[in-house]
Image (cartoon, rainbow, N blue to C red):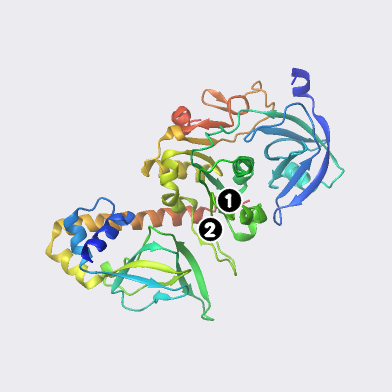
Amino acid sequence: MSLAAAWVPERVRVAAVERENDTVATLVLEPHGGAAPAPGQFSMLYLFGKGEAPISVSAVLADGRVAFTIKPVGHLTRALTALRPGDLVGVRGPFGHGWPEPPPDDPLVLLAGGIGLAPLRPVLQRRLASAGRAPLQLVYGARTPSEQIFVPELRAWATDPRARIHATVDRPEPGWRGAVGFVTEALAGVAADAARGTVLVCGPPIMMRQTLLRLRSLGVDDGRVYVSLERSMRCALGVCGHCQWGPAFLCRDGPVFRVDRFRPWLELREV
Amino acid sequence: MTDTLLDRLARHPVLADLDTEALGALATATTVREVPADTVLAREGENADRFFLLEAGHLAIETRDRASAPVLLQTLAPGAGAGWSWLLGDPWKFDVRAVDDVTVLEIDAAAVRAELERDPAFARLLLERVLRMVTERLEATRLRLLDVYGP
């Protein structure tokens, strides 16, 4: 991507909109840009008159279309989730360093909270599409069953003999037959795979910090654990400094970091 | 039989690293129970005369609203323990129900309490394990109260 292209949004048409629940929507965008994004990377999505926001890639389809799953939390994300097929959106990217690709024979443990499942979905899809036989475990915490995302896929993933899906909610609703409890309560059940595999964590900051504490107490080495961090990103090119976290610009050096390499900055309250 | 129980107790995460002597004391008070889904293992208000170490299946911790409909508070996965009211001589505060087919190690509270009185070293080891279980449950409850996935 040229420097000019990196600064100027490309007009991309919305191919489809999938409603994940009452508020969260996935925009499937027509093929655009150069290289296909890697799992864990993000793009800047722009709406004229509204602004621009970093949104993680939630799927890369075989025909080159790219999906972004968006939770409406402000005026821009509300407008993005209100888009319809055929609408245009500005796109810059993809940017950043995404998730590592662990050896196909190593166990993979994904720990997601809320909308944090979106950046992990491409990893899960890629692993299950591969011929590898290694176990994959997903612990997915949500506030309520009706606020879960990718529900049909959660059910489909659970039918794969290599996969174990632990979906848990903070607040059950009538008819819910699954687990009730915080993500950290499910970690003992994945500790054996986590201790000899790769662990990817994405969710709200408190959930990620508490998850890292629990993983450590379960004996999981920090060198196996990766987190996707979030800060206010503006330029996405490591220039403006809005997303600086200690020595790193999250947009350029992250958003994914190996925990042992970033631990001092994760624990430093001043940053 | 006792050997088998010892192995099963030793493998249970709640009792991780407990010494053989302490495990032996617990084994004499332990029964393996396999129960089908929806079995109520303990009822709110009843005498808490036992506690459970969950080996397989899932347990639900429930209470009831005014219409006697169950209100699900939490679920427990294999490796969890259920029940600490027995330590305080309190009744069960909540129902414990099997969500699916369940295998538990059911431990007789009176026998364990007698052993706690008799052997302070055993008491320290076991109470530490129970405290760890309670602490983890409390921390998770606090995090749920935070509503971290909120809008």
Residue identified by numbered label 2:
A170
Q: Is residue B147 above or below residue A48?
A: below
Percent position of residue A18, x then y: 75, 50
The answer for how far apart the CA atoms under marks 2 and 1 are is 9 Å
User: Which amino acid, by three-letter code, is at mark 2?
Assistant: Asp
Viewer-side residue, A55 vs A195:
A195
Q: Which residue appears farthest toward the bottom when viewing the image?
A: B67
Q: Is residue A153 above or below residue B31?
A: above
Percent position of residue A215, x then y: 42, 43
Q: Is residue A98 above or below residue B124?
A: above
Viewer-side residue, A91 vs A50:
A91
Q: Locate residue A3: give its quadrant.
A: top right
Q: Locate residue B103: give its quadrant.
A: bottom left
Name the side, left or right, on which A17 lies relative to B59: right
The answer to whether residue A268 of the structure is visible from this angle is no
Instruction: Quadrant for the N terminus of chain B, please.
Output: bottom left
Q: Which residue appears farthest toward the left when viewing the image?
A: B118
Name the side, left or right, on which A153 lies relative to B123: right
**What residue is rendered at 63% in x and 51% in y?**
B151
Q: Chain of mark 1?
A: B
Residue identified by numbered label 1:
B149
Viewer-side residue, A116 vs A33:
A33
**What residue is rendered at 29% in x and 52% in y?**
B16
Q: Chain of mark 2?
A: A
Q: Is residue B2 above or below residue A262?
A: below
Say few, some or many: other residues with alpha carbon within 10 Å of mark 1 (under 14 / 14 to 19 / 20 or more).
many
- Per the image, label 1 sits on a secondary structure element best described as loop
Name the side, left or right, on which A247 lies relative to A20: left
Q: Which mark is residue B71?
A: none
Percent position of residue A44, x then y: 72, 33
User: Which amino acid, by three-letter code, is at mark 1?
Assistant: Tyr
**What residue is rendered at 65% in x and 31% in y?**
A233
